């Protein structure tokens, strides 16, 4: 078997190249959330494990939904979100999580 070269479409995400547009768009959303991360590093893990930010305290499903919503509203629309846009998104995700946990 020989190694051959073929052309491919490559999409640039926030930090690297991706073979699918969806993966590149999601990388922009994840990078935006990481910029907002306010997690505190642990100090003596057994005594004070550190505080987690709103994004890292979400269950995995909710975090994935937050990324999908951000991608849909801002990345695909091609617009840069303002601070108010991001805060509204955080409130929306937090409220939907509270509603799901209530019943």
Image (tube, rainbow, N blue to C red):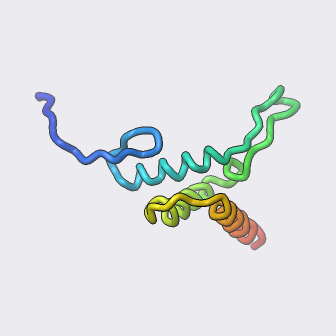
Residue 32 image point, x, y percent: 57, 49
- The correct choice, above or below, for 96 with respect to 55 in the image is below
- Given the current orientation, which residue lies at the most extreme right position? 47
Residue 50 image point, x, y percent: 80, 37
The answer to whether residue 48 is left or right of residue 68 is: right
Q: Which of 102 and 28 is in front in this view?
A: 28
Quadrant position of residue 87? bottom right
Which residue is at 83% across, 26% downward? 44
Which residue is at 36% across, 54% downward? 21
Which quarter of the image is occupied by the N terminus? top left
Which residue is at 36% across, 44% downward? 18
Residue 65 image point, x, y percent: 57, 61
The number of discs equals 0
The answer to whether residue 3 is left or right of residue 66 is: left
Quadrant position of residue 62? bottom right
- The correct choice, above or below, for 99 with respect to 2 in the image is below
Residue 2 image point, x, y percent: 11, 28
Which residue is at 47% across, 52% downward? 26
Q: Nearer the viewer, residue 55 or 33?
A: 33
Q: Which of 8 and 79 is in front in this view?
A: 79
Which quarter of the image is occupied by the C terminus? bottom right
């Amino acid at each position: 078997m020989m190694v051959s070269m073929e052309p491919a479409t490559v999409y640039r995400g926030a930090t690297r190249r991706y073979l699918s547009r969806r993966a590149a768009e999601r990388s922009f959303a994840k990078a935006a959330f990481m910029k907002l991360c306010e997690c505190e590093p642990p100090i003596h893990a057994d005594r004070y494990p550190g505080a987690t930010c709103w994004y890292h305290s979400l269950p995995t499903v909710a975090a994935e939904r937050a990324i999908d919503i951000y991608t849909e509203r801002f990345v695909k629309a091609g617009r840069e979100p303002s601070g108010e846009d991001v805060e509204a998104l955080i409130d929306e995700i937090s409220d939907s999580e509270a509603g799901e946990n209530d019943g």
